[in-house]
Image (cartoon, rainbow, N blue to C red):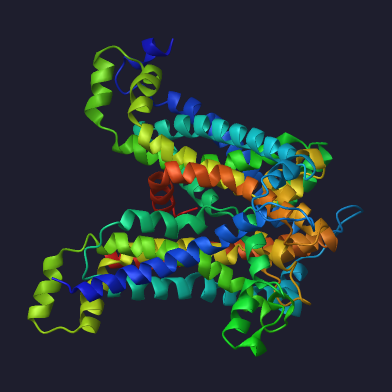
Amino acid sequence: MAAAIGRRPGEPRRVAYLYILPAVLVFGLFILFPLIRTAQFSLYEWNGLGASSWAGFQNYRDVFTEPQLRGAFVHALVLVVFYAVVPVLLGLLLAATMSRAVLRGLGFFRVVLFLPQVIPMVVVAIAWRQIYEPNGPLNDLLRSVGLGALARPWLGDYTWALPSVGIVGTWVGTGLCLVLFLAGMSRIPRELYEAARLDGAGPFREFRAITLPSLRGELAVALTLTVIAALKTFDLVYVMTSGGPGTETTVPSYQVYNNAFLLGRVGTATALAIVLTLVVFVATVLINRVGERGQR
Amino acid sequence: MISRGERLGNYAVLALFAVIAVYPVLLILQTALSNDQIGGGGSFHWENFADAWDQGHFGSYLRTSVIVAVLVVGLSTLLSILAGYAFGTMRFRGSEVIFYLILLGIMVPAEALVIALYFDLRELGLTNTLVAIVMPQVAQSTAFGTFWMRAYFRGSSREVIEAARIDGAGHWATLWRILVPMGRPALTTMIVLVFMWTWNEFLIPLIMATDESLRTAPLGLAFFQGQYTSGTALLAAGATLVALPVVVLYLFLQRHFIRGMVEGAVK
């Protein structure tokens, strides 16, 4: 049937609609429509069961004024430092120090360093919970090097719980950044470095003039993946701390879930989800703008 | 060109980071093989895996995960190939607008969909069904897959398509007999990524599945962890079982995982 139609040149114009129909249908039903409904829900006050009442922008006002909800965004910002800023800086530093060498066996290291990216977050959370336990490996290590005074139940500590969750993000992100940057560096022509050295450039100038500009694309990819992962953190917090102690480790995603299903504040939860979506959008666009500008 | 000392130093730094990367994984494995009961002998306790499978219900969780993964990967791959083909090789009115709408959809986090979806599906009596767990993920993966396959079809050679047409192949035959077999690498990367995302997904099944019989593997693991004190051999054995399929696939197809995540960073 199709063969007969396809022979005419330029024909596949109307048939294109048939090809995209299933995808558009599923997209409309399960992304576009729920997104619009989420926006609609966010303008009402509703406990998920009874009647709902019009709330206007009150839910959004709550998101920005309620200390617990605002706090979730502050925590997300802290996590961005641990998930994205630290891994990118570490990755750049390491890649820069290795830039002069042609290393063999990089394939093996690439496989191992990238591994944390593919393991389910729930499994990662369980492994790190064990590391942070009062009698877990971390405290054992501290005690064995004479720093026993620093040992503590990390995830139950008001000051240290959030950084402890953040460190897990650093663990997940650093390998990714290192793999990306090493791959990027291997494409930079060695002659550039030799020429720079003949001109008397030191390692720092070398890095700023050659390495950094050549890695713009990789930098954008690394930041996109890690920043979004930080902003959308959910599994890790759900399994490791449930937002505690107190509300020290709540994040936007966790508050969305918490408000919608545990506190019966569907309007607040959806308003929060919309704000989170906008933050993710803006972050993605900004990061990729910067990345593109560098490539030209 | 570089000194031996510097080369060794580089390897030392890489090795240090490699050790840090695998340490939590090895810790889980070691705990999974350790002795849970006081007084039991032997050094490797493989029976922990059997116990997790039966007593911990991980057999059932993994079965649900396999069903969900097969459905999501199968459906989204099919829809992505069809849509990507149209967007990549055909010209039609509205194609730009629709494509960019889908591209925006890739960035929408699941948090902004699942709550409204949960309450609307509850109206229809569809929560706590495979449909509720599978279809939102099919939609998200199709959005990504359409973007991914469009790039492949755009890059596929025009001469090949022209030649197929001259040989009398219609657009349907050209797609399935020529372009899809030629696009094996691109397809493999997409399938591997979608499988990983589906297998590791937590939020959607958490909200949609209230029955234990519909719990996916990560979800079952999280509930198991909440029920018992952590750090037990059984929990670690369960965690190992949950991570195993993705990790094994990764070891065989690591290039696809890395390339896919780098090039698909829009998600």
* Left or right for B231, reference B262: right
Which image quarter holds the C terminus of chain A? bottom left
Q: Which of B4 and A228 is in front in this view?
A: B4
| Residue at (36, 61) in percent of width and height | A180
In the displayed structure, A202 sits above or below A59; it is below
Q: Which residue is drawn at 63% across and 66% down?
A: A128
Quadrant housing the N terminus of chain A? top left
Q: Which of A159 and A84 is in front in this view?
A: A159
Residue B56 falls in image quadrant? top right
Q: Work out whether residue A4 or residue B94 is closer to the camera in this orientation and state it.
A: A4
Q: In which quarter of the image is residue A8?
A: top left
Q: Position of residue A106 (x, y in %)?
A: 31, 58
User: Residue A246 in the image: x percent, y percent?
Assistant: 79, 77
| Side of B50 where A51 appears, left or right | right
Residue A23, visible in the rendered structure:
yes
Q: Is residue A278 above or below residue B212?
A: below
Task: List the single residue furthest toward the right.
Answer: A50
What residue is rendered at 58% in x and 54% in y?
B108
x then y, percent, for residue A95: 32, 70
How many callouts does the rendering have? 0
User: Can you say whether A93 is above or below B125 in the image?
Assistant: below
| Rendered residue at 72%/69% (across/down) | A60
Residue B154 is situated, as x and y percent measured from the top left of the image, at 32, 37
Q: In this view, does A64 lie to the left or right of B262?
A: right
Is residue A234 something one can see in this rendering? no
Asked which quadrant contains residue A201, the reply is: bottom left
